[in-house]
Structure formats: C-alpha cells, structure tokens
Image (cartoon, rainbow, N blue to C red):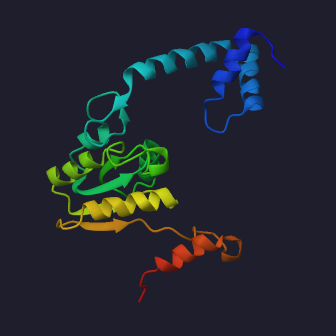
Amino acid sequence: MRISPLIDQLIDALQILPGVGAKSAQRMAFNLLQHNRAGAKNLGRLLEESMQKVGRCNACRTFCEESRCGLCSDERRDASVLCIVESPADVIAIENTAGYRGHYFVLHGRLSPIDGIGPEDLGIPLLLERAQNLNVKELILATNPTVEGEITAHYISEAMAGREVLITRIAHGVPIGGELEYIDGGTIAHAFNGRISVG
C-alpha cells in the first residue's frame, strides 16, 4: 500500500541499505517521523556532509577525509608488511584485534569477470606499485574465503611472482569456540588444508 509520495520515497530510499527490505524500511521511516525527527535531520546532514567530504586515502584506498588516512600517516607502523583486504570494514575488523601493525591496501571489491570487475577496477596495478615503493617484505592476502575472494588472492599472488616478497594467506577454518559437528564441510576441509605444525 502506498502511503504518500514523500513517505513512499523515504521508504524506497532506505531500502538501498544492505539487508533492509520494504518492511524494515517502513519501520525505520515511521520511527524517525514519529519519535526522532531531530535525529533524522542530523542523519540527513551527516549523510550529505560525508558524501561531499569522505574520499579514499591516496595510499591504501580506505575511506578518509584527508589525502592520507591516519593508519598510513602513522610512522610507527611496519611499512614492510602489507595486508590486502576487500573493504574498509575489513580494515576496522583487523584493527579491532590490535594484533596487526603493518599497512593496508583496500581493493573495494573482488575480481568477478561475470560482473565486469577486473584488476584495474580493484586498483591492482596501484597495489603492485605500492608494494614496490614500500619495499614490502610480506604481502598478506586477507580476501574473504569466497570463490571470488580466492580468485582475487590467487591473481594477486601470481602478479607478485618473481619478486622478493613473502606472500601469505590468512587462515580460514574452525572458529575459536566452534564445535566440529556444527561446522559445514567446506570450512572443515579448508581448516584441514591450512593446518600448521604444533610440535
């Protein structure tokens, strides 16, 4: 049922968010209109400002407001280690572990010939240039364990072949606290293939 032209447009606009369908968008729209108009105005202002001011770091390509992000500007980080990720959200996830002190390169996607996404679309030529300029000793492939993520990791490792760089892949498999009987076969197979020596 259509409500009013403006409310219908608001509901349609909210559906561009991932995981938000028509019902969720309708609840959000009504909640903002009924209970939080000041918050909605602030959200609108911040969305507008973010679209104008947030770009990509010239070095790692994550989102930031300056030409270089805070991580790339931090001289305490190890420039000889470069971690390749698919999205800025992956950078945040890794940083939240507080265990990685190297640099990043954000692809903003993964190779997908079917969708017309090739190496240039992901900035892979820039990645190769950056790896050389930083004199990288280790390249960590942290793409997701999907078919496209694996293809992307393989493509990058092939492109880096012949260089004096250690190329590693993050481990995938059984999560801490997970029980084997509840884990899918593909994950278990991946865990077995990536097993390491403990003795």
Q: Is residue 9 above or below residue 198?
A: above
Residue 178 image offset from top left, x and y in percent: 64, 70
Residue 198 or residue 28, whichever sits in front = 28
**Does the image show residue 88?**
yes
**Rendering quarter of residue 122:** top left
Q: Is residue 63 above or below residue 165?
A: above
What residue is drawn where x is 26% and y is 30%? 67
**Does the image show residue 144?**
no
Question: Would you say 34 lies left or right of 69 here?
Answer: right
What residue is drawn where x is 76% and y is 24%? 26
What residue is drawn where x is 71% and y is 27%? 25
**Rendering quarter of residue 35:** top right
Residue 98 image offset from top left, x and y in percent: 40, 54
Residue 114 or residue 72, whichever sits in front = 114
Q: Is residue 152 above or below residue 177?
A: above
Q: Quadrant of the N terminus?
A: top right
What residue is drawn where x is 65% and y is 25%? 14
**Rendering quarter of residue 188:** bottom right
Q: Quadrant of the C terminus?
A: bottom left
Question: Would you say 94 lies left or right of 21 here?
Answer: left
Residue 52 image offset from top left, x and y in percent: 40, 19
Residue 29 or residue 3, whichever sits in front = 3
